[in-house]
Amino acid sequence: MTTDTLPITVTAYRWVPAFAQGLVRDLRVRWALEEAGLPYRVELIDHKEKDSAEYLAWQPFGQVPAYEQDGIKLFESGAIVLHIAEQSDVLMPPDAAGRARVRTWLFAALNSIEPSVQELTGIDLFHGDEAWTGQRRPQVEGTVRKRLGALAAWLGEREYLETRYTAADLLMVTVLRNLRHTDLLAQFPTLKAHSERCEARPAFQKALRDQMADFVPDPVAA
C-alpha cells in the first residue's frame, strides 16, 4: 500500500450498506484533514482486503480508517483525529490548558457517549426483530438519554464544547450522527443546534460528499 504523491493516505470502504453510508468512521478523519487543510488520498478497500495479512499489519482489527503520514502508520479514528488536530490551529487551541480540555472531550466522545449510542444503533439496525431487544432496548435508550442530558447541560448556551470550534466538536458530532435514525437528538435542542452548526461547516460538507461519492453500488445486487 503506497501513498503515491500525497503525504497522507486514509483507508475507507469501497461499499457499505445504505444505512451505514455517511457514518463510517473515515468520515471523521476526512473532516479533520479538510479542516486542517492537509492534502490526502483515500485508498478504498473491500471487505476481503481488510482481512489480508498486509492490511492487518497496518490495522490489526481489519477496520477503517487506517492512516499513514510520512511513514507513521496509525489506526483508531479518535487517535487519528487527535494526531491531525495537533497539527492544526483550527482544531486545537494554542494554549496548553485549552489543548488538554480538547483532549478530554475527545475521550469523552469516545468513552462516555459513543458506547451506548453504538449499542442502541446496533440493536435498531441489526437486531430490531429479535425478541431480546424488547427488554434491552429501553435500558440502552435510557442510558443514551442520560448521557445526552448531561452533554446538553454542559453545552448550555455555548456554541461549542469549549470556547470555539475544535476537534472535540468534530468528534462529538460524528458520534451523535449515529442517532440519525431516531428522534433522540431532536429532543435536546441545544445538541441538535450544535450538530447542525458543525455540519454546516464547508470542511464537513466536502468530507461527506467525498465519502458518499466513493461508495460503489451494492456488488451483490450488481
Image (cartoon, rainbow, N blue to C red):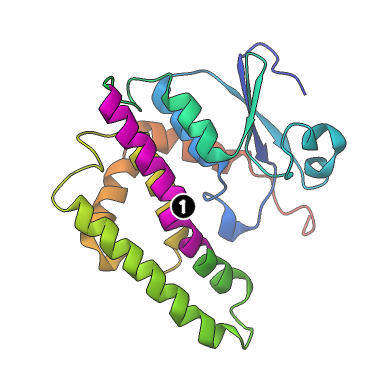
Give the secondary structure at mark 1.
helix
Magenta segment's dominant SS is helix
Kind of residue indicated by mark 1: Asn
Residue occupying image coordinates x 24% and y 52%:
193
**Residue 132 horizontal/vertical position (percent):** 61, 86
Please give the range of residues in magenta: 96-118
Residue at 27% of width from left, 34% of height from top? 165
Q: In this view, does 140 lie above or below 24?
A: below
Q: Name the residue under label 1.
A: 111
Residue lying at the far top in this picture: please name it.
5
Q: Position of residue 15 (x, y in %)?
A: 69, 48
Of residues 49 and 151, the one nearer the viewer is 151
Q: What is the crowding at mark 1: few (fewer than 14 residues within 10 Å), some, or many (at least 20)? A: few
Please give left or right for residue 38 compared with residue 44 in the image: left
Can residue 161 be seen at all in this image of the molecule?
Answer: yes
Queried whether the magenta region covers residue 148, the answer comes back as no
Residue 153 figure quarter? bottom left
Is 107 situated above or below 183? above
Pick the quarter of the image with the C terminus. Answer: bottom right
Q: Residue at x 44, y 81 (%)?
A: 138
**Furthest-right residue in this view:** 53
